[in-house]
Amino acid sequence: MRRKLAAGNWKMNGTGDALAELTALLTAQPDPSCDVLVCLPATLLHRAAEAVRGRYLKIGAQDCHAAASGAHTGDISAAMLIDAGASHVILGHSERRADHGETDAQVRAKAGAAQAAGMTPIVCVGETLSQREAARALDVIAEQLSGSLPDDARFVVAYEPVWAIGTGKVATLDQIAEIHAHMRRLLTARYGDAGQPVPLLYGGSVKAANAAEIFAVPDVDGALVGGASLKAADFAPIVAALSAQ
Ligand code: PGA
């Protein structure tokens, strides 16, 4: 059985006072039937983990270094993230691929490091608008999965079309269905039965108003939610929609 996952990505947003949103989420959704994760800035991880201790809500990070330790000023290792209370880490988000020039090979190395430390990587892939317009979306996704995923199938994949992130422009249900079926086929071809439990998330302008129809698409096991994860009032109905699936 594949587990459903509603994951929030706060990106570079939030200081201590924003942690009240996590407790508000727990109040609004005291017992969902899906997994729920919020990926926070590193500065909030420890406080967040303390704030939700003993509850179902999991805490995640947004990047890690590929090395376990060493002379890497400003970077954070997977072991440090676990120490701060994180169980998951987003890797290869398109904003990191664009802003920091992260390559598939680097994402794969980070994913392996996260797994070795005991974390679950959430590996992000997604085509740009020009790649989609050139009818290259399927090839781009295949290339990114092949280059970014580690050999051990214990990870989550998030399909996030770059043109749908933070734009309010959500992919159509047909586009989501096509890419998710493609990803499922590729995972089965590479990992066999071990790939079956891998949850496939959709991300890109998911909100309460479109969550239920997206979650009803075959091979969609949840969402990676940016803007609409910042406020409990916006994220709780998305969690409820997945929980109701
Ligand atoms: P968005 O971001 O929901 O604000 O479009 C999604 C993401 O980048 O993970």
Image: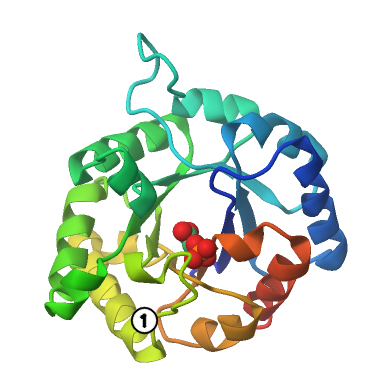
Q: Residue at x 61, y 43 (%)?
A: 40
Q: Is residue 52 visible?
A: no
Along the horizontal axis of the image, is 234 left or right of 40? right
Tag 1, which secondary structure? helix
Quadrant of res 165: bottom left
Quadrant of res 241: bottom right
Q: Residue at x 59, y 62 (%)?
A: 227
x and y percent of residue 120 in the render? 46, 45
Above or below, 214 relative to 8: below
- Most extreme residue toward the top is 71
What is the crowding at mark 1: few (fewer than 14 residues within 10 Å), some, or many (at least 20)? many
The residue beneath circle 1 is 176
Along the horizontal axis of the image, is 108 left or right of 243? left
x and y percent of residue 236 in the render? 74, 69
Q: Amino acid at mark 1?
A: Ile
x and y percent of residue 56 in the render? 74, 54
Q: Residue at x 62, y 54 (%)?
A: 37
